[in-house]
Amino acid sequence: ILKTLALGFLSIFSGVSNAQNTADYQVVPIPMEITQNQESPFELSRETKIVTGDDSQIMRRNAGFLQQYIKQQTGIETIIATKGEGSRIVLQTGLKSDSPEAYEINVSSDVITVTGASEAGVFYGIQTLRKSIPVKKTATITFPSVKIKDAPRFSYRGMMLDVARHMFSVEEIKTFIDMLSLHNINKFHWHLTEDQGWRIEIKKYPRLTEIGSMRKETVIGRNSGRYDGETYGGYYTQEEIKEIVKYASDQHITIIPEIDMPGHMLAALSAYPELGCTGGPYEVWTQWGVSEDVLCVGKDQTLKFVEDVLNEVMDLFPSEMIHIGGDECPKSRWKECPSCQAKIKELGLEADDHHSAEERLQSHFISQVEKIINDRGRKLIGWDEILEGGLAPNATVMSWRGMSGGIEAAKQGHDVVMTPNSHVYFDHYQSTDVSRDPLAIGGYSPVERVYSLEPVPSVLSKKQRKHILGAQANLWTEYIPVFEHAQFMVLPRMAALSEVQWMEPENKNYEDFLQRLLKLIEIYKINDYNYARHIFDLNA
Ligand code: TNX
């Protein structure tokens, strides 16, 4: 694989030296259909207007993005106008399509039209144009005359970032969102709470951030356990969160917040020990792994707490999907907890052939959480452990322990997002060169492996396949203390992910992808995105 990457790199490298000022539509992900028009090419220059047609704010924002990309990549300053003649790029909606994110681009000698099925469709047309434009200071760019038709394969194209193990600044989160746009990703799954830190301000429970956001920092290294004498932490205020939600929404990205429960809750327990089975005291965790201490789901006050927290979360995030975690919740405390055992009795949750009483208690808890979410017209999504003990009625399953959880859920008629740790865990190593891959959690998922993911399992029937909403990659940050490192872990694997999410499988081709990827990397470079250069290196 390294050899193939290196070869791809060399061939494009020799191409770059004689690069023309010509747009090249072979981008990542490559559009579904590109047909040559029998017309002379379009010439973009400082005379070119970006025409928005109407004065809708969303369309003007779209135009602003295109203007900014052109300027950044070429130095050409275009003009935005509501109407205009002459050399122009027209942005408009009105395309008929099953997918609201579909678009068409028509390049003729004096006009480029980008027609979206919605403003989001126009935005993806803009991304394609932007990736077609060379990264080169120039006065004019020639666009060969073509017609492009494109639409995404999946409506859910996600990327998760864990900000709880390590936190990133508001500016860094915004940069991460920009990176998602470049890869046509439309869902940002934001993992906000963990054993090791609570990162979202909740007005009703101030100690969550006062206490739960700070931990004694240990030296990074596998289970080093050594305290470095510093306190690590931080959180996002509600104002900052609103700002980030708006920033993402301007780029047609929905943020799906995750409040992980009933496991991975030690930070919350350290602030409100009465929510645990033993009553504490607890500390924000300074190690990685799975804690035995979890929320006590036998007490009514726990559900009240969850309801209050989720209500504030839903006030902040307009997303239809709300992620409640559900992963890795050991049941040892519940087995010994009088409140949990009383609850099991009260509800008549006896063990059966498949589930323990405690698994059924977890299931009952998740169903109650689902009611809170459904009551506000939202949908619950959770990690595949929410299958244990029976799925909540309308839940969507995020399948991470391979694809079997997702297959099971789809068979039961539930929606599914595939994010198997066999392919798309970006906290795994990406090369075999341990001297240049920094310490990672384990696992090996190089670019080619990511590229090979097929999110729709062939064992599913036609009807069941419709439940696979899409795919997502995850970046867990136990070993990733700084943002540049996070960028290094996701780039360029995110490019491979974007072809999995966007393209029909019969149009994918890994060798071809590698060629196109190297052009995308030019855009990484001018944005100062740190990426894993070493995987392209002949000597890697
Ligand atoms: C499992 S994936 C976890 C995370 C870890 C990750 C490390 C999932 C739902 N839970 O808490 O960070 O493994 O790869």
Image (tube, grey):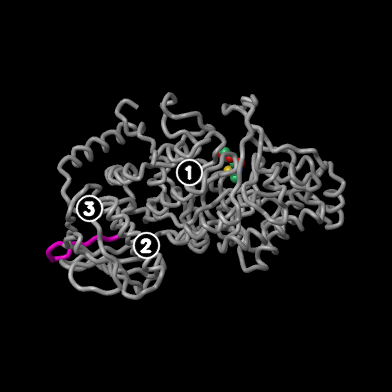
Residue 529 at x, y percent in the picture: 38, 42
Query: What kind of element bears circle 3?
Result: loop
Which of the two discs, 2 and 1, labels the residue nearer the N terminus?
A: 2
Q: Is residue 496 above or below residue 254?
A: above
Mark 2 to mark 3 CA distance (whole Å): 18 Å
Q: CA distance from mark 2 to mark 1?
A: 26 Å
Please identify the quadrant where the C terminus is shown: top left
Instruction: Answer with left or right where residue 335 lies relative to residue 70.
Output: right
Q: Are marks 2 and 3 in contact (CB under 8 Å)?
A: no
> With respect to residue 27, does 285 lie above or below?
above
Q: Helix, strand, or loop for circle 1?
A: loop
Indicate the quadrant of ligand 1 in the picture.
top right
Identify the residue shown where x is 86% and y is 53%. 345
Q: Identify residue type, mark 3.
A: Asp
Quick check: is the Cβ at mark 3 less than 8 Å away from ligand 1?
no
Q: Is residue 108 magenta?
A: no
Q: Which residues are magenta?
A: 32-41
Circle 2: residue type: Phe
Mark 1 — residue? 424
Q: Residue at x 36, y 31 (%)?
A: 534
Q: Which residue is mark 3?
A: 24
The residue tagged 2 is 123
Q: Main secondary structure of the magenta part?
A: loop
Distance of label 1 from label 3 (alpha carbons): 29 Å
Within the magenta stretch, is there residue 40? yes
Discs 2/3, front: 2
